[in-house]
Amino acid sequence: MIAAIGSRISRVFERTAPDPFVLAILLTAVTAAAALLFGDFASKPADESRAGYLLTQWRSDSGLWALIGFGMQMCLVLVTGHALAEARPIKRALHSIAAIPRDARTATAMVAFVACVTGLLNWGLALVVGATLAREVARSLEARGVRAHYPLLAAAGYAGLLVWHGGLSGSAPITMTTEAGAARVLNDPGLLERIGGPVPLGETLASPMNLVVSGGLALLVPLVFALLVPRDGAGELRPVTDYRPLESEPETRPENGTRPASIPEHLARSRVLAWGLAAAFGLAFFSSAAGKSLGSIGLNDVNALMLMLGLALHASSASYARAAEDGARGCAGIILQFPLYAGIAAMLKTSGLVAMFARGAAELPSWALEPGMFFLSGVVNFFVPSGGGQWGIQGPIALEAAAAAGTDPGRMIMAVAYGDQLTNMLQPFWALPLLAITGVKAREIVGYTAVVMLAAAAWMLLGLAVM
């Protein structure tokens, strides 16, 4: 029954869901209209019109171009992850793992479980691991004559972004562990004092509530994905050959056993140069990561690690560069859409819309405050799909409400974190690397992720209510 429901919902989304770039354009238009109609524009100069001020903030360095650096980081996540997956030792390892499941249901559950576990460790790694494993599992099943639903496998590979904010790289809880980090977000020493100072991880990520909620999600999500797999012969199974997953072109790979014909070719195929640069990236990673927890490792650290491993395993700069060039073909969505979402965030902040929504949620009765912030966070994430950026906007008001109502600030932080990660299953922003690697379209996976999202929402709300 669940598989039939998932198939129907998926068909609806396939007919109605816009492409990610179109969605970003529509969200920009909706945000601009809502800002002009309902925003308070408290910071607007008296002699400037609302429309003029909104346009100025939208196109400013803190608007459209605020995510340029982050966009480059995300492109590197895609490129380095793809290049690493194309290294022969990694491909052999992936083939071995992908050969474990014997049927489509087990395969889909395995991909979702690995994606969830990786997401709880580090969201950057989850983006690459989930997508790459989904692609390789689909190929392995097809090579063995096992029918599988490829878009559903790709959706399972995205599951890490449904659990990440309750894991070791969760932006909101980690930011609030130090006085300096909390002060950057709250920008109000008085509020920090009213909530009792920085919030230790024992009250957020390591709390009994989050251990149950996040640990339960790592089991619930694979189970729901397994139940969504249609029966063999139901006419719904779609093989990987119907798509064009991102992969290295065979003709670009260097011929084996041939000697370099020139000095430039010798240098390009030199192991010394590749391993020397890999050693440099390794030193950069370990010096930066020294003393950090696993969850506080940032995207720059992840990319340095991926560069190190990729160069070391390809063993030549020419081989690595070819694989990276193939990976770069998937960056178009990131390059085009990140500025639009940065502009949306600027309009929401400039107009005061997020603050107005959060103040409204803060006026809810104490028993409804955490669920209210949970749902508000899910809505805000659709327009500002960045955990750290959203916490910077919503965090101060959420904690002000917690202080006023006498609510545990750690629980309020996690309510916002759960809502933020929940609607990743509808918002294709973070799925762009996965879509590039697997070759599927957003509309082909969002129906299935929507079903999983509903099950996850019920589990998160249950945790907030009874733990």
Image (spheres, helix red, strand yellow):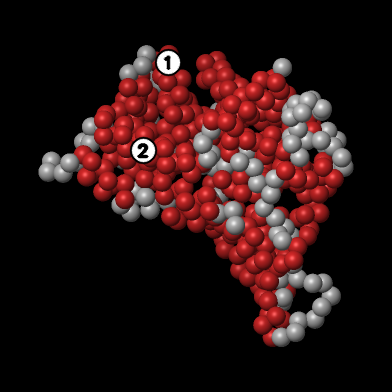
Kind of residue sitting beneath label 1: Ala
The residue under the point 32% across, 37% down is 32
x%, y% of residue 336?
Answer: 47, 51
Q: Is residue 432 visible?
A: yes
The residue under the point 69% across, 49% down is 244
- Secondary structure category for the residue under label 2: helix
As drawn, is 265 to the left or to the right of 256?
left
Total marks shown come to: 2
x%, y% of residue 218?
Answer: 66, 30
Q: Earlier in the sequence, mark 2 or mark 1?
A: 2
- Above/below status of 444 relative to 9: below
Q: Which residue in the structure is indicated by mark 1?
A: 368
As drawn, is 86 to the left or to the right of 443?
right
Looking at the picture, tell me which residue is in the foreground, 140 or 362. Answer: 140
Q: Which residue in the structure is indicated by mark 2?
A: 29
x%, y% of residue 58?
Answer: 31, 46
Looking at the picture, tell me which residue is in the foreground, 63 or 252. Answer: 252
The residue under the point 12% across, 43% down is 47
**Furthest-right residue in this view:** 144
Q: Quadrant of residue 90?
A: bottom right
- Whole-number angstrom distance, CA of label 2 to CA of label 1: 31 Å
